[in-house]
Image (tube, rainbow, N blue to C red):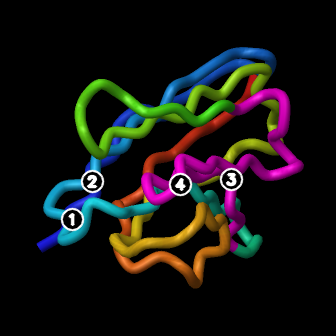
Amino acid sequence: QVQIVESGGGLVQPGGSLRLSCAGIGFTSDYYTIGWLRQAPGKAREGVSCFSSSDGSTRVADSVQGRFTISTGNAKNMIYLQMNDLKPEDTAVYYCAAFDRWGPCLINAEAYDYWGQGTQVTVSS
């Protein structure tokens, strides 16, 4: 059974930084994609960033380009999302999600089969 384990998040002032971590446990394939998506109150879920082990591809949404960076960790199936220069509009519940099949990195929510519980990120002074 696949499990998605998230950590990080919290309260930060505008211009500050946070790092989110995500581990995928129990993948049935060596090929997987792990992504971060977020949902602000009253808004649709939005793809933020992703990494695919199939081809090493990454994607970052235009809304966070230049501020957010996705990277892999030393541990297998571990992904980090470094968030810099945070803005109040980045406030949302951030979800880590994954699918374990060959394919490129995708940031649309419909692509994902497994989801974490979400972690709150609040950017406020």
Q: Position of residue 10 (x, y in %)?
A: 50, 31
Can you say which quadrant of the picture contains the C terminus? top right
Is disc 4 in contact with disc 1, using a CB cutoff of under 8 Å? no
Residue at image coords 27%, 54%: 24
The foreground one among 53 and 38 is 53
Residue bearing the label numbered 2: 24
Which quadrant: the N terminus?
bottom left
According to the picture, the residue beneath numbered tag 3 turns out to be: 48
Q: Give the mark nearer the N terminus: 4 vs 1.
A: 1
In this picture, which residue range is highlighted in magenta? 45-68
Q: CA distance from mark 4 to mark 1?
A: 17 Å
User: Is residue 90 part of the magenta span, yes or no?
Assistant: no
Q: Earlier in the sequence, mark 3 or mark 4?
A: 3
Q: Mark 2 and 3 residues: CB-CB less than 8 Å, in contact?
A: no
SS for callout 4: loop
Q: Which residue is mark 1?
A: 27
| Residue drawn at (36%, 43%) of the image | 22
Left or right: 75, with 1 as reference point: right
Disc nearer the start of the sequence (2/3): 2
Q: Quadrant of residue 76?
A: top left
